Image (cartoon, grey):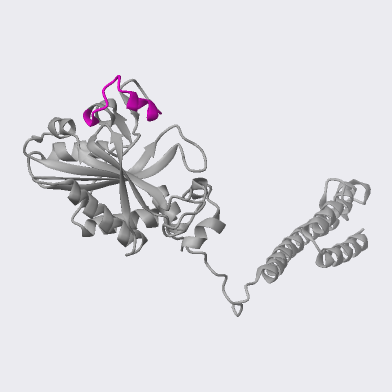
């Protein structure tokens, strides 16, 4: 029996030391030390040997079990270290390789145009003002001379949250808020950039777009001041040779009102498909502030006058960069956006 244990021990140690994986080692452990293992079977058979030999054989068998358990544990550690080493070899970083380039972000073309517009008007003495995206019916319509039954509302009535609140359809409410805050002090010169919302969705319209409104209020402001301001703006934005043309129009919050055109950026006024052979492209709306808007905002229309204008940032960007479809600004196509870095 003792000789059998010695042979079993040599065989078990040899197999343990040659185990190539944790799975193989587990099978060896079960074979020799499991409930039906070879060493376990010897221990269970101690009753069949002479009583004088049992203590020595039992001691030898238990010592062998302890030894095999230690050898198995050592082999487990060795296999674990080997696995880590192999994994490290696979994932090792070659520090001599060139680094991967990091793609840096950049400003969206609408942000670039907004910043450029703000820079131009700040240089002309205007301040940047902001207002809430969710407006009351009063500031969005009533204070801007849109009574509840005014037909001009039909062009803008859009996203109502309640009967009183809606997503603003223009940034003109900021004009009223700015005048209320400053009245009766003069002058007032602000531009109001921000998002606006209307029920439009096609190649030249979006349900969410960006506007910049402008307002100047002071004593003795005339239509000539408005024209001079806008001419200065378009020449800084589109080039020193640009011209503007004002056509009579209607806006409830200005009187008189005008649509403002510039020479076609494609044909320089000669006439082409883009401008329908007119040589002109509409760029914004403007006019003298309506007396009603001045009075509800805290100013006496008999003492002060003012002008206002409003432009779509997307419209300016499309003309500046020659973009034919407004929806490109909102599809997040990096091939398009990276052109403006």
Q: Pinpoint residue 317: horizontal percent, then vertical percent.
A: 42, 53
**In terms of image quadrants, where is residue 298?**
top left
Outermost residue, bottom side:
96
Q: Is residue 312 visible?
A: no
**Residue 151 lies in the magenta-colored region:** yes
Task: Residue at 30% x, 31% y: name it.
Answer: 135
Horizontally, residue 83 falls left or right of residue 264, namely right
Q: Position of residue 26 (x, y in %)?
A: 80, 54
Image quarter (top left, top right, bottom left or bottom right) of the N terminus: bottom right
Q: Which residues are magenta?
A: 143-158
In the rendered image, residue 321, in percent from the top left (x then y), is placed at 46, 58
Tell which of 132 and 168 is nearer to you.
Answer: 168
Q: Residue at x 19, y 50 (%)?
A: 224
Quick check: is 190 in the magenta stretch?
A: no
* Identity of the residue drawn at 20% across and 57% down: 124
Q: How many marks?
A: 0
Q: Position of residue 89 (x, y in %)?
A: 69, 71
Query: Is 74 placed above or below 130 here?
Result: below
The reply to whether residue 225 is in sight is: yes
129 above or below 134?
below
When asked about the image quadrant of residue 100, the answer is: bottom right
């Amino acid at each position: 029996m003792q000789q059998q244990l010695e042979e079993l021990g040599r065989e078990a140690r040899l197999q343990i030391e040659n185990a190539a994986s944790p799975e193989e080692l587990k099978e060896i452990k079960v074979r020799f030390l499991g409930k039906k293992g070879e060493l376990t079977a010897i221990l269970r058979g101690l009753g069949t040997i002479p009583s004088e030999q049992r203590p020595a054989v039992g001691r030898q068998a238990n010592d062998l079990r302890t030894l095999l358990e230690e050898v198995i544990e050592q082999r487990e550690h060795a296999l674990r270290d080997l696995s880590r080493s192999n994994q490290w070899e696979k994932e090792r970083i070659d520090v001599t390789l060139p680094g991967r380039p990091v793609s840096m972000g950049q400003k969206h073309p609408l942000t670039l145009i907004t910043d450029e517009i703000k820079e131009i008007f700040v240089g002309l003495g205007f301040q940047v003002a902001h207002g809430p995206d969710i407006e009351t019916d009063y500031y969005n319509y009533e204070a801007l001379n849109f009574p509840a039954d005014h037909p001009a509302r039909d062009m803008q009535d859009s996203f109502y949250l309640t009967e009183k609140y809606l997503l603003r359809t223009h940034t003109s409410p900021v004009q009223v808020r700015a005048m209320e805050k400053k009245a009766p002090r003069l002058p007032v010169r602000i531009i109001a950039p921000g998002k606006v919302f209307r029920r439009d969705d096609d190649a030249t319209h979006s349900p969410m777009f960006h506007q910049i409104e402008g307002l100047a209020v002071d004593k003795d402001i005339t239509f000539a001041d408005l024209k001079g301001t806008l001419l200065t703006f378009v020449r800084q934005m589109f080039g020193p040779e640009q011209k503007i043309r004002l056509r009579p129009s209607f806006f409830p919050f200005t009187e008189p009102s005008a649509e403002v055109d510039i020479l076609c950026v494609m044909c320089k006024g000669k006439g082409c498909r883009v401008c329908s052979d007119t040589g002109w492209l509409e760029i914004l709306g403007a006019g003298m502030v309506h007396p009603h808007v001045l009075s509800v905002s805290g100013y006496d229309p008999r003492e002060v006058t003012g002008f206002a204008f409003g432009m779509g940032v997307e419209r300016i960007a499309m003309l500046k960069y020659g973009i034919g479809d407004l929806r490109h600004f909102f599809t997040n196509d990096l091939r398009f956006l990276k052109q403006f870095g």
